[in-house]
Amino acid sequence: MKFNDITEKTLIEEIKKEFLSSKPGLSLGIGDDAAVIKAGKKKFLLTKDLLLDGIHFFKDIHPPRLLGRKSLNASLSDIAAMGGTPLYALLGLGLPEHTSAEWIDGFFTGIKSASEEFDTALAGGDISRAGVLTISVTVIGEGRNIIKRRGARPGDVICVSGKLGDSAQGLQLIKQGAKLGDDQRTDVLLKAFFDPVPQVSLGRIISEKKIASSMIDVSDGLSVDLNHLCEESGAGAEIYAGKIPASNELRFFQKKDREICLHGGEDYSLLFTVPEEKKRRMELLDKEYEISEIGRMIRGRDILLVEENGKREKLEIKGYQHFFR
Amino acid sequence: MKFNDITEKTLIEEIKKEFLSSKPGLSLGIGDDAAVIKAGKKKFLLTKDLLLDGIHFFKDIHPPRLLGRKSLNASLSDIAAMGGTPLYALLGLGLPEHTSAEWIDGFFTGIKSASEEFDTALAGGDISRAGVLTISVTVIGEGRNIIKRRGARPGDVICVSGKLGDSAQGLQLIKQGAKLGDDQRTDVLLKAFFDPVPQVSLGRIISEKKIASSMIDVSDGLSVDLNHLCEESGAGAEIYAGKIPASNELRFFQKKDREICLHGGEDYSLLFTVPEEKKRRMELLDKEYEISEIGRMIRGRDILLVEENGKREKLEIKGYQHFFR
């Protein structure tokens, strides 16, 4: 068997089985957005992301400052997805031989700006030479009411923050030659890709107000991440096609925006489920944060897309699967 | 200025200045073997290593199981160097497209074996495709009497555990075509390179018995790591050439073993300093662990090599500097 046959998911399943741990303090291990470690009254969250040039980002088109921000913010989004507060970050950086000092300066300016914006101190790391630019970020956070991927129940309302698809549309425009500064409309979409915003404060409020039964961030695309949430919760879902939030900017470029909203990755929106009796609390939040009710958890394991005319069909699960690209 | 002008050290100095943090809880940040975070009565240690094929290891010659062990053990050595106890690990893995299932199996068998040997639970991570095999390990440990690189004072005795140079000699033999199983003598040296042992229990005992004023692990080579320790402590050192511990196996291959003992990396020995009044405690340890007294801290900033005939000369600082290789 060659590695082409193995998806990230099947490999992680194997590893989960193999490394089942009863280590004291480890209350949630492999397979969620972050691991959870108990220390006295505190719970720490640990998350790690590996980002490689040509696979997770494209150094030549990504402004270094925004790449620095995105590298840290992608991990902060994992902490947000657990309802936690980020505290510290570690940065592993592999730099190709001819990286300019200007690039390094820009990148660290970006790391610093995200680190200040989300009050996350750079605590250490590792720097070395590399064949291709390699970025590895670990973030340590803390949380009280930690929200996992599992916990959603049939009947719970499915909500998502912000708009979907802008980042994927931004990438598409970049591939077609669009640049930051071209015009206001493309800027919205390019910024969504180059400089996405992790929903740290929304995640924390959802946790404090105990609104959600489960949560994940939309990093691989709505269909893939909803599928994770359903699998972990042991339930199905129906998504109302007409309710999926798309921006005017996206609609301008995509007459049929549905595909990109369902399967485009890296929006870093929060996808969460709310039990019926807590819907009121969620609606109060909507005044401050842009939250859309896009579906409902159902019995069984199906994930369905419900058209506005009532037609129901299975939702195809596709999105960022780095192994297959 | 191109990146060739920048060493890891100068870059880390810049980053240290730029990211000086007063974040509550962060008691030691960038620039030691691990960052230290206080949480109530506990102190957590955080360390991160980035390992790249062709730079930090050679996938084609490193048996996958031993590479798995070494990947985790290199980070455990950083925890040992602070006198800490490792608790949890996160693994970031970037796999080239044609990695075989057999390789993956071997690698994870190695991770598991080191994880069990040193009671460190794999708590999570990130897996993706990559151009070259990319391994990123984060280890979280805890410690009470944390031993830093700074703290050594003039007059303190300089000690090192185990033998030096075996790993570098092992690599040299491998480059000449030696293989595991060739004979007992080469096996000792090849194992030192392929499967080095982090000094976790020694580090912990040194911490518990409050023996050392400063400590570091010998990962980049004695001269480079001693230089780190001296710089952080603001003192100099003299090393007695005749006292540097070399194995019989190394001496068999190297009539002049000094160069490789002084500058060969990846031994994962512990290098630490002991105040005169604590020497007795250190000597008691020597019964169980192999510890050599190799020098003394001195006033000033010089690092000197003292020959058996009394001749003193400046010790050249050279060793693993990944940027220059």
Image (tube, coloured by chain):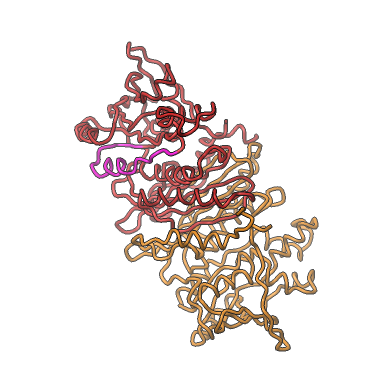
Chain colours: A orange, B red
Report the residue at 19% width, 32% height from top. B280
Residue A54 lies, in percent from the top left, at 68, 50
Residue B56 appearing in the image:
no
In which quadrant is the N terminus of chain A drawn? bottom right
Residue B29 appearing in the image:
yes
In which quadrant is the C terminus of chain A drawn? bottom right
Report the residue at 38% width, 31% height from top. B230
Q: Nearer the viewer, residue A121 or B93?
A: B93
Task: Name above or below for residue A281 compared with residue B172.
Answer: below
Task: Name above or below for residue A281 compared with residue B205.
Answer: below
Q: Nearer the viewer, residue B78 or B302?
A: B78
Residue A323 lies, in percent from the top left, at 64, 57
Task: Name above or below for residue A47 compared with residue A104.
Answer: below
Residue lying farthest front? B182
Report the residue at 23% width, 30% height from top. B276
Residue B206 on the magenta span: yes
Q: Is residue B58 left or right of residue A257?
A: left
Residue range in magenta is: B195-215
Residue A64 lies, in percent from the top left, at 65, 49
Residue A73 lies, in percent from the top left, at 57, 59
Q: Nearer the viewer, residue A60 or B123?
A: B123
Corner quadrant of residue B223: top left
Looking at the rendered structure, the number of numbered marks drawn on it comes to 0
Residue A291 on the magenta span: no
Corner quadrant of residue A260: bottom right
